[in-house]
Image (cartoon, helix red, strand yellow):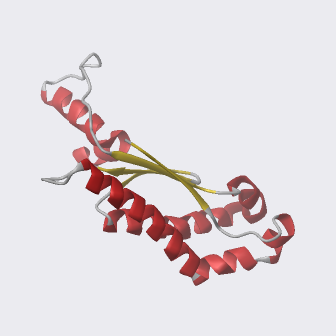
Amino acid sequence: RVGSLLQLGFGEAGMRIISKSLKQGQVDFTQKGSVVYGIYGFCDIRNFTDCTEVLGADIVNLVNNVSQHVHQAVIDSGGAPNKNIGDAFLLVWKPKGDALLQQVADSALRSNLETILQMQRCRLLRRWEARSDVQQRLPGFRVRMGFGLHY
């Protein structure tokens, strides 16, 4: 239970370091970290500030709708959603077993493409886009994402 909370707050590498320190009876802040190889992805909702000003508290519902598509595509491609901060999502794909890094990178890229396709097909997102208050502030608005991948 505590391990799950640590992983949620500090990520996998941070959780291992803190768990090891706790087993020793005290937290050692000088303990060296560990390198975690993988593909790290970042994506964010475009025009988020303007949407927030128009939607107010309803922006949470829009973010939740988008996150369903992002998270599902990442999980389906063997990755893991790591953190959500407002309109931004941090995503991780780590090689498992005999998987080559190139295969993992290809999976991450496919995940981004799948997210775009699923969002284009989503009727719920079309409703957000069609709102008159959104269109008045952002004529022609569509829910769009920006993506980046890093090794």
Give left or right: position of 111 versus 136.
left
Give left or right: position of 16 versus 56.
left
Q: Please provide percent x and percent y for residue 86.
A: 58, 52
Depth check: 107 or 124 in front?
A: 107
Q: Residue at x 65, y 63 (%)?
A: 59
Q: Considering the image in quadrants, where does the C terminus appear? A: top left
Give left or right: position of 110 versus 12.
right
Q: Residue at x 26, y 26 (%)?
A: 33
Q: Please provide percent x and percent y for residue 22.
A: 19, 29
In the rendered image, the residue lying farthest to the bottom is: 123
Give the mark count: 0
Q: Please provide percent x and percent y for residue 107.
A: 33, 60
Q: Residue at x 78, y 63 (%)?
A: 54
In the rendered image, the residue lying farthest to the right is: 136
Q: Residue at x 23, y 45 (%)?
A: 3
Quarter of the figure with residue 134: bottom right
Depth check: 4 or 16 in front?
A: 16
Q: Please provide percent x and percent y for residue 83.
A: 43, 49
In the rendered image, the residue lying farthest to the top is: 30
Depth check: 13 or 1 in front?
A: 13
Q: Is residue 128 above or below residue 41?
A: below
